Image (cartoon, helix red, strand yellow):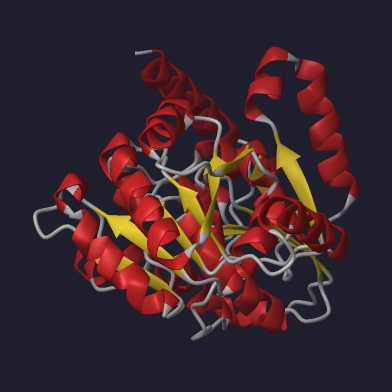
């Protein structure tokens, strides 16, 4: 109920603001002739996988505006991922909860935003429409505002807020698209035609060195290891953690390969069940930074995980990975990298995937 009231309030506020906006329209041809030296991208989605699936769109925008300084607004939860995106120059974090509780925090954020004097702002919405992102586009003071149409989401506000509206694929097209392609689709109007749908994430030399020291201490200088992440934010995406433990235990018994278990902020119960079922003693890493984790997976012989954010990190760095899929379609959500292999339940329930299925793929990859 609270979220409905909040959304209704934002919608009413946006309609009020729309009364004072200019009615300027910009054609794609006019936009293509504009000099853009400072570009703002607003991408506020709260899922790590969504942000990494947007990397091809950022790559395409970098090619389209090679000399522009590109600033990205991201949600707090995606700050670490956004900072490691090689196609943006600066990341501004919009901390929604902080700005709600402190009007001064919002004022400071908007003042920082307007200081940059953006030539253009692009709101990159695809599967949902963010009124907050649209309002941030106006607040940025950018000369030209560009964003996806809001018509598929039940209102026409985008036509009042954006000087140039971007199209979205219809439902039939979406069913045939990888999510990375879906992010690129609206940008074709701007002359962005990115065909490389791989994601991208880079870690620092310091993070690489920290990872190497950790591996030497926990696995030995020449020790092979796998990374196991038994959790997931969505309950329907979680393969039983006891089965992860069984796979890891068999690999340890047959191949003498160690296990590094990774725990995220919502994975306590899954990690407890995993550890209780292991026949060996994994090394546990809790709440690792994205850069350290990406380096760890690059060094690992294999990563085992659910359809969740870690899978997308593995794809972004080209790490070997087996991802368990239940209700979602790997053709749309699995990273396009061939290093990530999907094992999908035939009935849409991830619990239906057997230990033998996963073990067979793991042994094949490790051999």
Residue placed most toward the observer, 325 or 258: 258
Note whether 153 is above or below 317 in the view shown: above
The percent coordinates of residue 133 (x first, y second) are: 58, 43
Judge from the rendering whether residue 313 lies leftward or rightward of residue 293; answer left or right: left
The quarter of the picture where residue 157 lies is: top left
Image: 352 above or below 206: above
State whether residue 297 is above or below residue 233: below
- Numbered marks: total: 0
Q: Quadrant of residue 264?
A: top right
State the residue at coordinates (52%, 41%): 281
Please name whichever residue, 55 or 256, is drawn nearer the observer in this view of the structure.
256
Residue 306 seen in render: no
Residue furthest toward the right? 115
Where in the figure is residue 353, as x and y percent of width and height?
18, 54
Q: Which quadrant, please, contains the N terminus? A: top left
- Residue occupying image coordinates x 35% and y 56%: 250
Which quarter of the rendering shows the C terminus? bottom left
Which residue is located at x 52 percent, y 77 percent?
Answer: 198
Which of the pair 337/142 is nearer the observer?
337
Percent across and percent down for residue 100 are 65, 18
In the foreground, 154 or 25: 154
Image point (81%, 56%), residue name: 213
- Asked if residue 13 can be seen in this view, the reply is yes
Q: Is residue 157 left or right of residue 52?
A: left
Q: Quadrant of residue 97?
A: top right
Q: Is residue 64 above or below residue 87?
A: below
- Residue 199 percent across, percent down from the top left: 56, 71
């Amino acid at each position: 109920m609270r979220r409905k009231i909040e959304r209704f309030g934002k919608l009413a506020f946006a309609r009020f603001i729309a009364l004072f906006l200019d009615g300027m329209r910009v054609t794609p041809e006019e936009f293509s002739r504009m000099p853009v030296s400072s570009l703002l991208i607003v991408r506020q989605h709260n899922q790590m996988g969504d942000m990494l699936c947007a990397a091809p769109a950022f790559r395409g925008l970098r090619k389209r505006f090679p000399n522009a300084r590109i600033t990205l607004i991201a949600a707090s939860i995606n700050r670490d991922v956004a900072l490691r995106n090689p196609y943006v120059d600066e990341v501004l974090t919009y901390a929604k909860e902080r700005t709600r509780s402190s009007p001064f925090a919002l004022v400071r954020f908007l003042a920082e935003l307007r200081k940059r004097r953006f030539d253009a702002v692009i709101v990159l919405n695809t599967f949902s429409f963010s009124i907050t992102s649209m309002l941030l586009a106006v607040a940025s003071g950018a000369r030209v505002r560009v964003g996806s149409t809001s018509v598929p989401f039940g209102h026409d506000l985008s036509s009042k807020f954006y000087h140039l509206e971007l199209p979205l694929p219809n439902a039939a097209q979406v069913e045939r698209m990888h999510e990375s392609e879906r992010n690129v689709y609206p940008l074709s109007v701007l002359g962005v035609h990115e065909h490389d749908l791989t994601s991208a994430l880079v870690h620092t030399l310091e993070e690489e060195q920290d990872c190497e020291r950790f591996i030497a201490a926990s696995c030995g200088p020449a020790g092979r290891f796998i990374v196991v992440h038994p959790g997931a934010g969505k309950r329907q995406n979680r393969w039983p953690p006891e089965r992860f433990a069984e796979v890891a235990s068999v690999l340890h018994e047959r191949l003498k390969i160690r296990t590094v278990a990774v725990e995220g902020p919502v994975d306590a119960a899954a990690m407890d069940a995993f550890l209780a079922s292991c026949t060996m003693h994994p090394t546990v890493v809790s709440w690792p930074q994205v850069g350290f984790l990406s380096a760890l997976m690059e060094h690992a012989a294999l990563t085992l995980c659910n359809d969740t954010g870690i899978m997308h990190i593995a794809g972004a760095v080209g790490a070997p990975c087996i991802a368990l899929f239940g209700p979602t379609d790997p053709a749309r959500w699995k990273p396009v990298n061939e290093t990530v292999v999907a094992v999908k339940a035939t009935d849409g329930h991830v619990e239906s995937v057997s230990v033998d299925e996963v073990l067979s793929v793991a042994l094949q990859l490790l051999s």
